[in-house]
Amino acid sequence: MRRRMESLAGVVTALAGVVVLAVAALQGATAAPNSAGVSMLDFSFSPASVTVKKGESVTWVNNGQAPHTATANDGSFDTGLLTAGQSGTVTFNNAGSFDYVCVVHPEMVGTVAVSGGDEPLPETGDPISQGIPMAILVAAGIGLLGGGILTARMRS
Ligand SMILES: [Cu+2]
């Protein structure tokens, strides 16, 4: 019974390590991208819908053979004609949803959704993901994981 309890404690410690590592990974993921990419194919945009924050950019790459454009329906942006292999980048400084089309192939349609960017992120106020530096989180996670596995091994 006592052995089983100690082994359980090791497993719980190891699980805590996994949780801490997951938090660290999440923190890294939310800090990451400030742009999005859209592939122009013959004859569609992929993905057809992308979301960026205000001030971020979208790069269209023509991976098809035919020339394509990404041209906003409201005229707010236009990559101009991109031939095979060319790319065009647009920075979005206004929040909103922007439908666009390829002027050469009107059946090619897409949407760029631009979020406000200045509203607080949902994790704001969570002390774990706020103040603790990533390196400490990762070190703590690995330490807990290793210690837990070791405990479980030795006691069982
Ligand atoms: Cu096209």
Image (spheres, helix red, strand yellow):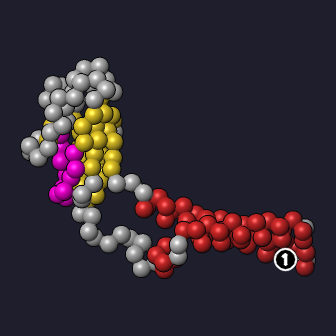
Residue labelled with disc 1: 5
Q: How many marks?
A: 1
Q: Give the residue type that dot 1 points to.
A: Met
Residue 47, percent from left and from top:
33, 39
Residue at 33% x, 50% y is: 35
Magenta stretch holds residue 100 = yes
The verdict on label 1 being within 8 Å of ligand 1 is no
Residue 107 is situated, as x and y percent measured from the top left of the image, at: 20, 28
Residue at (34%, 54%) from the top-left corner? 34
Q: Quadrant of the N terminus?
A: bottom right
Circle 1 packing at 10 Å, graded few (<14), some (14-19), many (20+), is: few
Q: Quadrant of residue 66?
A: top left
Judged from the image, the secondary structure of the residue bearing numbered disc 1 is helix
State the residue at coordinates (83%, 71%): 151
Name the residue: 36% across, 69% down: 121
Nearer to us in this view, 117 or 5: 117
In the depicted structure, whether residue 113 falls above or below residue 40: below
Q: Of helix, strand and loop, which mostly describes the magenta segment?
A: strand
Q: From this viewpoint, is residue 48 visible?
A: no
**Range of the magenta residues?**
90-102
Tell me residue 93's x, y (percent): 19, 56
Q: Nearer the viewer, residue 98 or 1?
A: 98
Nearest the viewer among 6 and 118 is: 118
Report if residue 134 is visible in the image.
Answer: yes
Quadrant hosting residue 16? bottom right
Q: Does 146 lie within the magenta span?
A: no
